[in-house]
Amino acid sequence: MAFSDLTSRTVRLYDNWIKDAVMMMTFQTQSDLFARRQKICCHSESLALHKVPEFGTCFGRIQDPRVEDWLLMSSPLPQTIILGFYIYFVTSLGPKLMENRKPFELKKMMITYNFFLVLFSVYMFYEFIMSGWGTGYSFRCDVVDYSQSPTALRMLRTCWLYYFSKFIELLDTIFFILRKKNSQVTFLHVFHHTIMPWTWWFGVKFAAGGLGTFHALVNTAVHVVMYSYYGLCALGPDYQKYLWWKKYLTSLQLIQFVLITIHIGQFFFMEDCKYQFPVFLYIIMSYGCIFLLLFLHFWYRAYTKGQRLPKTVKHGICKNKDH
């Protein structure tokens, strides 16, 4: 009986696959064609995931063709190499190279870098608002728009900019190494700076838009505040009086991850949400929970137990930079 059910189910899946293949030929727009390819892969997925060549073909068919020729988007290999070297440099090579050298004086560079990221974060936040979150998204089941409409393309560009900004932010850690502040290169810091760009490649490649981008919207807003703080720190001791709000930064991070977790958590209680790539929501949910726990631990260690980190070091450059 079990064999009969399996055979019947296989026939139905194959029949659906054939029907969808025929129907796909009737769709003319790129967005409709892409949507049909996704559906076909979903139909065949349960039957063919164990067949690597077939799964690879399906994997290729559901990539967003709009980003095929964009920088770093042709394959995850280039970013994997970059991030692999980043980890090697900040945990091994960099400290060894700086071991017998004096720390670099980077005050002017740090000021420029931090305030540049403030402006860049403001711009990305504005673009996320104008491409969906302030112009039509419901903050519930918002699906990805794969069309060539101006709004959809604007969201796509914003997602890529956000992804690329994560490579710029790798300089956070490089500056620590060059200034011989190796104690600030924590697991939390390196993990965050590595996992964000690596996972976001898949986000841009497959699902640039919709409810999966809410955490990016929130993160850009948080980074406006955080890099403003770091920029003021870099200006020197004369600006210490403007940094009374330092103690609220970790609270801001906690609020960020709570908002992300709550927003994504809605999906698991929706009966008919047609978001195209639910796997990304599981990843974002896991990410939010993991970092919520890590920052709670940081909060407990740094404040509840009284192990507060020093506010500044020489030239007023802040030591604490976990974000």
Image (tube, rainbow, N blue to C red):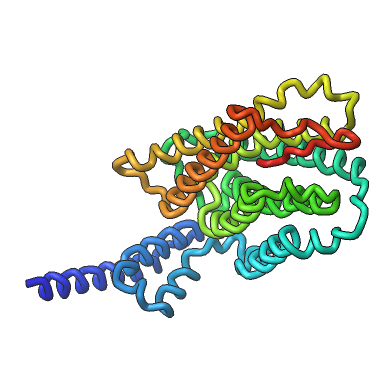
Q: Residue at x 36, y 71 (%)?
A: 49
Q: Residue at x 67, y 62 (%)?
A: 83
* Viewer can see residue 228: no
Locate residue 141: give its quadrant. top left
Nearer to the camera, 243 or 52 = 243
* Viewer can see residue 99: yes
Of all residues shown, which one is farthest toward the left? 1
Percent x, y for residue 191? 61, 52
Q: Is residue 309 above or below residue 20?
A: above
Q: Is residue 30 left or right of residue 196?
A: left
In the rendered image, which quarter contains the C terminus?
A: top right
Percent x, y for residue 94? 80, 61
Q: Is residue 50 left or right of residue 68?
A: left
Q: Is residue 269 above or below residue 19?
A: above
Q: Residue at x 33, y 74 (%)?
A: 48
Q: Is residue 264 above or below residue 14?
A: above
Nearer to the camera, 94 or 259 = 94
Nearer to the camera, 241 or 58 = 241
Percent x, y for residue 71? 70, 62
Percent x, y for residue 319? 77, 39
Q: How many marks?
A: 0
In the rendered image, which quarter contains the N terminus?
A: bottom left
Q: Residue at x 79, y 53 (%)?
A: 174
